Image (spheres, coloured by chain):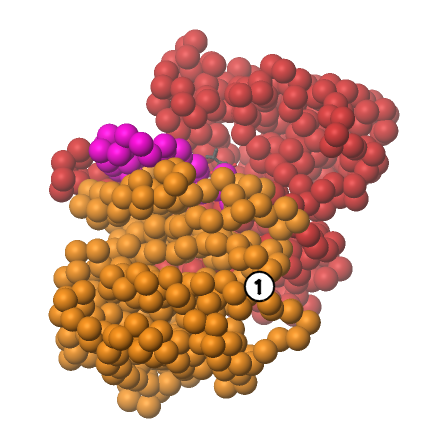
Chain colours: A orange, B red
Amino acid sequence: MSASTETAVIDIAVIAGDGIGPEVTAEAVKVLKKVTSAEGLELALTDYKLGAEHWLATGETLPEKTIQALRGHDAILFGAVGAAPGDTSIPSGLIEREMLLKLRFALDHYVNLRPSFLYDGVASPLANPGAIDFVVVREGTEGPYVGNGGVLRKGTPHEVATEVSVNTAFGVERLVRDGFRRANERPRKKLTYVHKHNVLVYAGHLWKRTVEAVAAEFPLVSVDYLHVDAAMIFLVTDPARFDVIVTDNLFGDIVTDLAAAVTGGIGLAASGNINMDRTAPSMFEPVHGSAPDIAGQQKADPTAAILSAALLLHHLGHNGAAAKIEAAVKADVSTRNPASPRSTSTIGDAIAAAL
Amino acid sequence: MSASTETAVIDIAVIAGDGIGPEVTAEAVKVLKKVTSAEGLELALTDYKLGAEHWLATGETLPEKTIQALRGHDAILFGAVGAAPGDTSIPSGLIEREMLLKLRFALDHYVNLRPSFLYDGVASPLANPGAIDFVVVREGTEGPYVGNGGVLRKGTPHEVATEVSVNTAFGVERLVRDGFRRANERPRKKLTYVHKHNVLVYAGHLWKRTVEAVAAEFPLVSVDYLHVDAAMIFLVTDPARFDVIVTDNLFGDIVTDLAAAVTGGIGLAASGNINMDRTAPSMFEPVHGSAPDIAGQQKADPTAAILSAALLLHHLGHNGAAAKIEAAVKADVSTRNPASPRSTSTIGDAIAAAL
Ligand SMILES: CC(C)[C@H](C(=O)O)[C@@H](O)C(=O)O
Ligand SMILES: CC(C)[C@H](C(=O)O)[C@@H](O)C(=O)O
């Protein structure tokens, strides 16, 4: 991977994927092209065919050679993958695990970064949402996502199925430190860590001790803890209280979909799967899935994909270009009228025009 | 345990517990006394001292002899237990695990039943909540709550902490069947099971296969599946869509606090820890905790405790008495004015008077 800040060429792998993935990614690429050319940056894009469609055609999920090829890029722009929930031609969860999660693990995307921001003009389902502006720093490479576990006496009345959540000091500490760094750079400097250490004692106490230890390095950051169930309540009664939320892989999955919902829906929620050590490219993707039910109809909102491209630019150090995208989104979003929805490409055009 | 439907004496163990537990339980007992006497039922109450205070005084969490004594009652009315989050005199989570969860496991409370109902006159944090009326059937005796797991190289940079979720065909099937039975008795006959089987394959597929198998016994019940993250979204964008939600212990913990929040708060959320086979007494408790910050101030809302007493009466077959409590709560709640909160005992008096 070349250090992109040393060169004007931004070398991006594009995995558009399935369902609405290609449509929303096309708009993100449109916006990326426009903003980089305005900033005098050169953009090199390489398409990779991966996902459910690709699996059906080839039987490949994510071959080792593709992982190697992806490693050569500065970053990955990801659309969405996965078949329709009822589609039985693809084993349930196969693409999610063997492709999406495999990428997160192989490229050591330990920071799963998910900002939640309630834009002016966006309707929250909450009656009094307040000024929501927080970021979830979700662990991305361990916890209940490691694929550990097994099944005994499958299909019999004596079946036992286990899932093992694996948590390491190494993995928790690097994530927690990243959370503190981000909190330290924000005006409110507030970090809330979310777990369930009254029940999950082993993992929970590793998290607790780690947060307490790392907190000592960041005296300006105020720290507070919530059990995941209590976090649910605050996310709907007072989401504006949050600044940085640090949590494990599974709790982060749950918290970020709720956070997306209270800020107006997953059509707006961007994310980064980030390798902070830059030993492999990071990957940026909308939080939403492939939504096969509306695929190919130009009904999907490309905003989350476009904001994910902004996170990508931030990660590569192109903060000016990223800020331009964010400002254009902010402007576009404030003019939206839910009564007259626009097509995917119309929204992309509008955001590109507002750059 | 005597079969209470054969006798007019209702023999209840009362564990008021810590914090606001005693205050709210006193109101539940007040209402229970009034309704049972009006119905010509005899009520026998036995107090058990358990919880954080009791542990500080005696070092006992839940001795075997207390479990044995509790087994002799028809049911248990539970308040709340636990010390203040910052209280370091009690090991974090000790009372929750060694007392509350120990009771749920020892008495085989496999159905953790949590109704969610938005009462007229109660303000939901949602702008358009719709008519919320569902019940969560949460598994109560396995999953990530079993206390399995461990820690290696504790306190070193090489620490590994694991949590093992244990799921059995036996445990999942009895819970799922209970959920279907309840769905089958409700007008909408709709069951939504919530898991994360695209990631937690072993446990998730046991759940999936079990739901599919049991569904065949209930042809009138429509079944639908949601990943837990997607369930978060629907719980705030369209909670009225749910009828019966069936889910595992940890997802149920998360879903029910969110459900309580969208229906106006945990001051109203009742629950039953139910042993459907009646091999041991079931236990009824408000979903809320001991709230040490407001304890002893008559600020707590006893409604959840009172509604838990109604669930207790339902479980023991006293449906008339239970329905009276529910109607009284409905009437009281519709007259509430958030601008002039009433004391704990005033609310209890009002509900008792409305019986
Ligand atoms: C598709 C799925 C495996 C994934 C996850 O659980 O992480 C998704 O829900 C997400 O949040 O990115
Ligand atoms: C106190 C805690 C152990 C408990 C749980 O997690 O089950 C509580 O949150 C609940 O939902 O009853």
- Residue B71 in the magenta stretch? The answer is no
The residue range painted magenta reads A205-232
As drawn, the residue found furthest toward the top would be B57
Q: Secondary structure at mark 1?
A: helix
- In the image: residue A131, left or right of residue A74: right
Residue drawn at x 70%, y 34% as measured from the top left = B307
Residue B159 point in image, percent of width and height: 17, 40
Left or right for B4, reference A117: right
From the viewer's perspective, is residue A195 above or below residue B87? below
How far across and how far down the image is residue B196, in percent?
A: 43, 60
Q: Name the image quarter holding residue A17.
A: bottom left
Q: Quadrant of the N terminus of chain B?
A: top right
- Taking the image as drawn, is residue A54 in sight? yes
Residue A218 in magenta? Answer: yes
What is the three-letter code of the residue carrying label 1?
Ser
Q: In front here: B106 or A120?
A: A120
A355 and B208: which is toward the camera: A355
Q: Is residue B185 visible?
A: no
Name the residue at 19% across, 73% down: A8
In which quarter of the view is residue A19 placed? bottom left
Residue B345 versus residue A16 in the image, above or below: above
Image x and y of residue B109, in percent: 53, 39
Question: Which residue is labeled 1 in the image?
Answer: A334
